[in-house]
Amino acid sequence: MPKIVRFHQIGGPENLKLEESEPQKPGKGEVRIRVEAAGLNRAESMFYRGRYVEEPILPSRLGYEVAGVVEEVGEGVDANWIGKRVATVPAFSQAHHGTLGEQAVVPVTALGEYPPNLTPVQAAAIWMQYVTAYGALVHVGGVKAGDFVSIPAASSSVGLAALQIAADAGATSIAVTRTANKRAELLTLGAHHVIVTEDEDYVARVKEITAGKGVRLTFDPVGGPFVQKLAEAAARGGIIFEYGWLSGQPTPFPLMEALPKAVSIRGYSLMEITLNPALAEEAKKYIYERLSDGRFAPRIAKTFPFAQTVEAYRYLESNEQVGKIVLTVP
């Protein structure tokens, strides 16, 4: 009997339970994956705490990212998928297709093959982070050489992906972090500049770094009142992407900062890309090529065995990590 992770009530990671389940059968347009590794994301933490963009259907599974081998396909799915090593692209509801477990059933449209130079652990750490950053910075933002890109929460897996995308485009990245203990590692991982908001004035430092021009693209998962500072530091015509709500605080629109510079503040989700087949294929091609030739490389912060799922999510919520937390699944 395969084990899956479910929760029966809203709350913290202590509510996550490893439970035995009947083997799932893939339905029409679906595949079943034998899971080898699972990448953890803030989206799951917010989901089991009832703070995500969708509500759990209790008892609920969770999870977006796994890597493994396709072992069965449903009606209408090409049987050639069987035996292929894949990683899931977040293009589905956690409430209906949660992946965390020894097996996962997902729509075939959510499959992404990964380059052979990656391990399953690395493959479980690619699609969420790179597609999220790609959609905002490349597809919408058109990041290019000469741009300044501000990346709050830069030590997250998505933040590190944004650093790599900015570097690949020839842009100058400004990693933003709350405390100084991650500064040196962020510089080692490719940030051109690091601003520590506990110790430095964000707006003043951006003006110094950009010679007064400001930041054209800001990629922010935090929200809250600091958005006012992001708008103050934005360039004329700059775009602030809000793709998360880690602060949990109200996020007022900074009208007086945005008006004179025509600054746009845009809500953004990777589902804009992954639920559009044409855009999803473009994103996968862009990312696959750069993973294959080494321009992109996922940073694994720490691995945990599947039996320590609760401990892994506690570590995720500690904010100590730089990069992705991955579960290894037997």
Image (cartoon, rainbow, N blue to C red):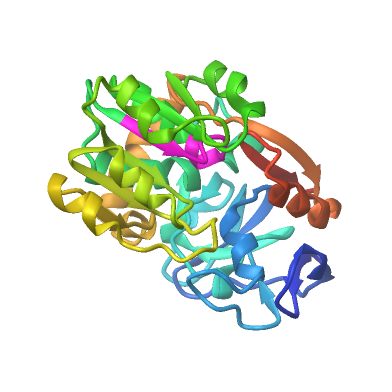
Query: The magenta stretch spans which residues?
Result: 149-160
Residue 43 on image: x %, y %: 56, 59
Going by the picture, which residue comes out furthest to the bottom?
A: 58
Residue under the point 53% across and 69% down: 52
Residue closest to the eye, 325 or 46:
46
The answer to whether 210 is drawn above or below residue 4 in the figure is: above
Verify whether residue 147 appears in magenta.
no
Q: Is residue 120 visible?
A: no
Q: Which of the 4 image quarters holds residue 151?
A: top left
The quadrant in which the N terminus is found is bottom right
Hey, which residue is sitting farthest right in the picture?
307
Q: Is residue 150 magenta?
A: yes
Q: Position of residue 8 (x, y in %)?
A: 75, 80
Does residue 44 lie above or below 187 as drawn?
Answer: below
Q: Is residue 260 left or right of residue 197?
A: left
Q: Of residues 235 and 10, which is closer to you in this image?
A: 235
Left or right of residue 188, residue 260 in this image: left
Give the answer, above or below, for where 196 lies relative to 272: above
**Residue appearing at x 49%, y 59% in the figure:** 245
Residue sitting nearer the eye, 96 or 233: 233
Q: Nearer the viewer, residue 240 or 40?
A: 240
Residue 86 seen by the camera: yes
